[in-house]
Amino acid sequence: MAKDFQQITLLLDFYGSMLTERQKSFLEYYYEDDLSLAEIAENEGITRQGVRDAIKRAEGQLFQMEERLGLAKRFAEVRKGLDEIDDAAQVIYESNMKTGLSRDINEAVVKIRVIANDLRE
């Protein structure tokens, strides 16, 4: 069972509350705590196969929720857009520094970058 750590943990952040407590716990043990299937099985008093099946079902539910709602995809798109806005603001700032140093432009650039950074958090 290959671990797609980043994708599952992102989906878990968005949709984890929609899983059962047990499903969420198994995914957290496996992906966040890096426990093996055998370790989880031993801790939970079930078989390794039972843990594997529960994790696979929970992963399937996460992917299904993302397919229907698209929140993680939209989040990634917004972050990419904010990075592009920040890069464009830096270009404007550098151009302004070379060509005449308008205080209004510098203040607007700072405001744009602050807003972009606040939205990223």
Image (cartoon, rainbow, N blue to C red):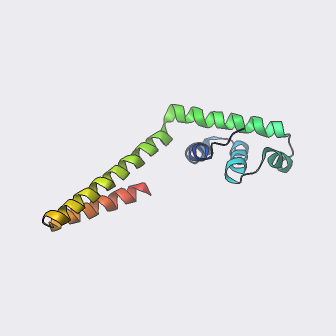
Which is more toward the observer, 47 or 7? 7
Which is more toward the observer, 93 or 8? 93
Q: In which image quadrant can residue 23 be found?
A: top right
Instruction: Establish if 55 lies above or below 33.
Output: above
- Image-based side of 22 in relation to 102, left or right: right
Residue in view at x 83 percent, y 45 percent: 38
> Could you tell me which quadrant the C terminus lies in?
bottom left
Residue in view at x 63 percent, y 42 percent: 4
Q: In which image quadrant can residue 57 be found?
A: top right
- Image-based side of 73 in relation to 99, left or right: right
> Could you tell me which quadrant the N terminus lies in?
top right
Spot the residue most to the front: 98
Position in image of residue 98 (x %, y %) = 17, 64
Q: In which image quadrant can residue 52 be found?
A: top right
Residue in view at x 22 percent, y 57 percent: 92
Residue in view at x 83 percent, y 40 percent: 48
Position in image of residue 54 (x %, y %) = 74, 37
